[in-house]
Amino acid sequence: MHEMECRVLSIQSHVVRGYVGNKSASFPLQVLGFEVDSINSVQFSNHTGYAHWKGQVLTADELHVLYEGIKLNNVNHYDYVLTGYTRDTSFLEMVVDIVQELKRANPNLVYVCDPVLGDHGSMYVPENLHPVYKNKVVPVADIITPNQFEAELLTGKNVSTEKDAVEVMDLLHNMGPDTVVMTSSDLPSRLGDRFLVALGSQRTVKPDGTRSTQRIRMEIPKVDAVFVGTGDLFAAMMLAWTHYHPNDLKSACEKTFSVMHHVIQRTISYAHDMAGPGRRPSPAQLELRMIQSKADIEDPAIVVEATVL
C-alpha cells in the first residue's frame, strides 16, 4: 500500500535570486517529502533588502483565476495551506475564501499561517491588515507562528512575563488555532542575554473529548545579523515537523529550531568568509544557504532542547 501523498498549497512571494517566501519554503518541504503547489503572490528580482529590486505583484483577482484553473481540473485537493507576508487586504481576504472552500472539501486540511504584521513595536505592513488577520485569517488558521509583537497585537494583551505569554497563547487558541508558536520574545532567558526565549502551545482533544494543552519553552542562541526568509523557512518547517510529530509539539519545535540553527550558522560563516575580516556582509552574501543545508533539513541534529512547562 503506497502512502498517501501530502500536498501543500503555498501562497507566498517569489524572488528570482535568493531565498524568501516560496523560494524559502518550497525546497525544504520538497526535501521532506511534500508535494508543493506554489502560487507566487509577487515575482520580484530579489528581496527588498537589496539596493535595487524590480517586479510584479499578483492581484486578488489573479489569485482567484489561478485557483479557478486548479478547481476546474478537480485537483483542488490539499492537506495543507501555507501563507506568509502579504501587503494587500483584498488578497488576504481571497486567501481566506480559498482556505474555507478547501476546508469544506477536506475538513482535515491544516492551514499554517505566519501572521506577518511587524516586529519590535512597529508594523511593517499597512495598518488595515491587522483587523483582517484578527477577524478573518487567524480564525481559520490551525497553526500560527507570530513573534511577540504580533501575538500582542492580535490579542490586545502585552507580554512581560512567562505567565502573560501563556495567557496570550491561550487567547490565540480561543481565536481558532490549535498550535501557536511565539517564535521570539523579549522575555529574559535563563541562559543569559545571548539567548532569546521562544514559546509554544498546542491544544489537543483526546478521543474521549477531554482537552489538554502542552506548552513548551525554548532558549534560542541569538544571532548578530539580519536575515531575510528565516520566518518563511520557520513556518514551512513547523508545517513539516508537526506533520511528522502530531501531538508532540516538543519534538516538532526542537527539529524546527534545530533546522533554523544549522541553516543560519552555515549562512553566517559563508557570509563572513565572502565579506572578509571586519567587513559587514552584503544582503547578497547573507542569502540563506538553503541547498547546502539539504542534509540538515532532512535530518537535523538536535541543538535546541525544549522544556515542557
Image: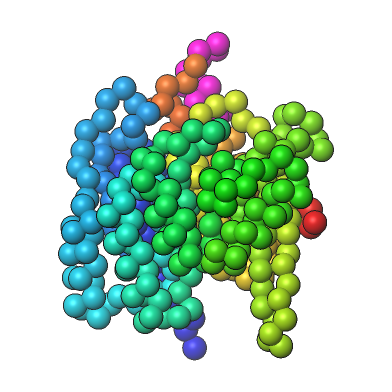
Q: Verify whether residue 296 appears in magenta.
A: no
Q: Position of residue 24 (x, y in %)?
A: 42, 47
Q: Verify whether residue 277 appears in magenta.
A: yes
Residue at x 76%, y 50% (from the top left corner): 163
Of the pair 130 and 115, the residue shown nearer to us: 130
Q: Residue 149's image quarter?
A: top right
Residue at x 23%, y 56% (from the top left corner): 60
Q: Position of residue 185 (x, y in %)?
A: 65, 40
Relative to residue 144, is residue 200 drawn left or right? right
Relative to residue 203, is residue 234 drawn left or right? left
Q: What quarter of the picture does the C terminus occupy?
A: bottom right
Question: Which span is picked out in magenta?
Answer: 268-279
Residue at x 72%, y 67% (from the top left corner): 213
Q: How is the image coloured?
A: rainbow
Relative to residue 121, is residue 129 drawn left or right? left
Q: Is residue 198 visible?
A: yes
Question: Relative to residue 157, is residue 170 depicted above or below?
Answer: below
- Magenta span: predominant SS is helix
Q: Position of residue 131 (x, y in %)?
A: 42, 52
Of the pair 228 and 33, the residue shown nearer to us: 228
